[in-house]
DNA sequence: GTCAAAGCGGACCTTGGGTCCGGATTCTAC
DNA sequence: GTAGAATCCGGACCCAAGGTCCGCTTTGAC
């Protein structure tokens, strides 16, 4: 037997909370002027419900994040090129990081909230583990590239939520320009075949 | 006239607080199990004193950080090569970032505390502005390198406190290995003259 | 020595994450 | 349909920690 099926109201409330949180974070200036009570209120639910369903703030953020990330995860794992596994490393690395960047551009507040509320550091979240592991594996196949472990960390660091927020928010760097700059940076790291 | 000289007890207490905070952070596992009350207590001082002297938690952290950073700042601004201004860009960029990395390795908890308590993001702190501005200026002089602004951000991101903490703390990467990996990464970014 | 200004410090306030439990709801068994 | 138990709801409540306040003390100028 799989597992005792949850009650109807439980799943309904869970959805309501996720939807409310998503909306609130999208509207907000800074993720931490959204309190748990705000979310509960907006979802028409008590705080207890919210904490029982998600454990704590980080849990809620994680759930939201994973839900939003799902399509990308699938495209990466079983999709067609340039994200899917059949892509040669030299093209897949920039494609992966571009996907991460675009995701964070599209979900700025959420990504920000998650990375800063991550008890400890973002590096303990298991979704970071996944991205890092994948990226490292792909980098491993790039000829002439050593230190794939550190390189994967360094490249992912270039797409950190607060950096993205700073560039897109404060410095008003346009989306396409940022993508181009990241791509060019990656090109240099992968072997500098660009212009010299 | 300069400014009304502070009272003796005021400066004495300020020193005491900085010293106490430094010790506490150095000993601690995670920076946020050190409370303001702890610091006040360890310094033999009331909370009021502490907040009057530094404004808020972030202010105290900033003061400590800047104090520790002072020697490096001087070495960078008016010192001899490889950190000083007389160094050719190709050597100065790695030297600068190596200095940052070493600093964060030597002051892990403090750097961590500062970056995570920075109201908003680390990118609003003015010491980040300084490092970024300097690094960008130096990168500007590297032949064949475009996007010096983004590149400076990306390189600094590779030395973020929580990444350093994760690598040095959780993954037990030895100091010299980390320095070597960072250096090699930078080399590739600067023009990939390494091996291809 | 005197007096005003600057500083001190701990009691107190506020905020927000997280808990608890009496009552309402839903599912299952008959 | 209904009884009963397991599950869930939700808002009152708790607590920790950052930050404020104000009566008392210390300092330093005259």
Image (spheres, coloured by chain):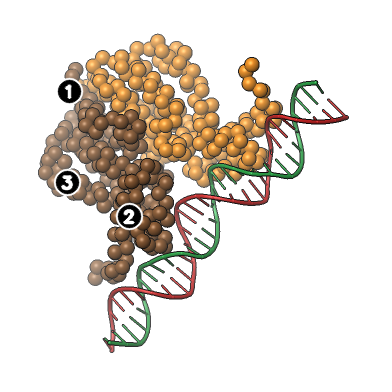
Chain colours: A brown, B orange, C red, D green
The chain that hosts pointer 3 is: A
- The answer to whether one can see residue B178 in this image is no
Callout in the foreground (3, 1): 3
Q: Residue A13, percent across and down? A: 32, 63
Read off the residue under disc 3. A75
At 45% from the left and 12% from the top, the residue drawn is: B80
Q: Please, what secondary structure does the residue beneath circle 3 have?
A: helix
Read off the residue under disc 2. A20
Q: Residues within 10 Å of mark 1 (few under 14, many from 20)?
A: few
- Which of these two is toward me, A91 or A52? A52
Q: Is residue D14 left or right of residue B180?
A: right
Q: Residues within 10 Å of mark 2 (few under 14, many from 20)?
A: some
Residue A86, compared with residue A1, is above or below; it is above
Q: Residue B123, percent across and down? A: 40, 32
Nearer the N terminus, badge 1 or badge 2?
2
Residue A133, compared with residue A158, is above or below; it is below
Does the CB distance between marks 3 and 1 fall below 8 Å? no
Q: Residue C13, percent across and down? A: 59, 51
Read off the residue under disc 1. A193
**Quadrant holding the C terminus of chain B:** top left
At 36% from the left and 28% from the top, the residue drawn is: B156
């Amino acid at each position: 037997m799989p597992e005792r099926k949850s009650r109807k109201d439980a799943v309904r409330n869970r959805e309501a909370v996720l939807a409310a949180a998503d909306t609130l974070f999208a509207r907000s200036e800074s993720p931490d002027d959204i309190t748990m009570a705000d979310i509960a209120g907006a979802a028409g639910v008590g705080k207890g419900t919210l904490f029982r369903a998600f454990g704590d703030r980080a849990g809620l953020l994680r759930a939201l994040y994973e839900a939003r990330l799902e399509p990308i995860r699938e495209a990466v794992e079983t999709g067609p090129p340039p994200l899917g596994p059949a892509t040669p490393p030299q093209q897949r690395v920039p494609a992966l990081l571009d996907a991460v960047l675009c995701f964070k551009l599209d979900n700025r507040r959420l990504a920000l909230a998650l990375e800063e509320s991550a008890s400890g550091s973002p590096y303990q979240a298991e979704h970071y583990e996944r991205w890092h592991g994948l990226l490292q594996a792909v980098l491993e196949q790039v000829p002439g590239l050593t230190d794939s472990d550190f390189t994967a960390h360094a490249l992912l660091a270039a797409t950190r939520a607060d950096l993205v927020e700073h560039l897109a928010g404060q410095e008003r760097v346009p989306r396409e320009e940022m993508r181009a700059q990241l791509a060019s940076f990656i090109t240099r790291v992968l072997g500098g075949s660009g212009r010299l």
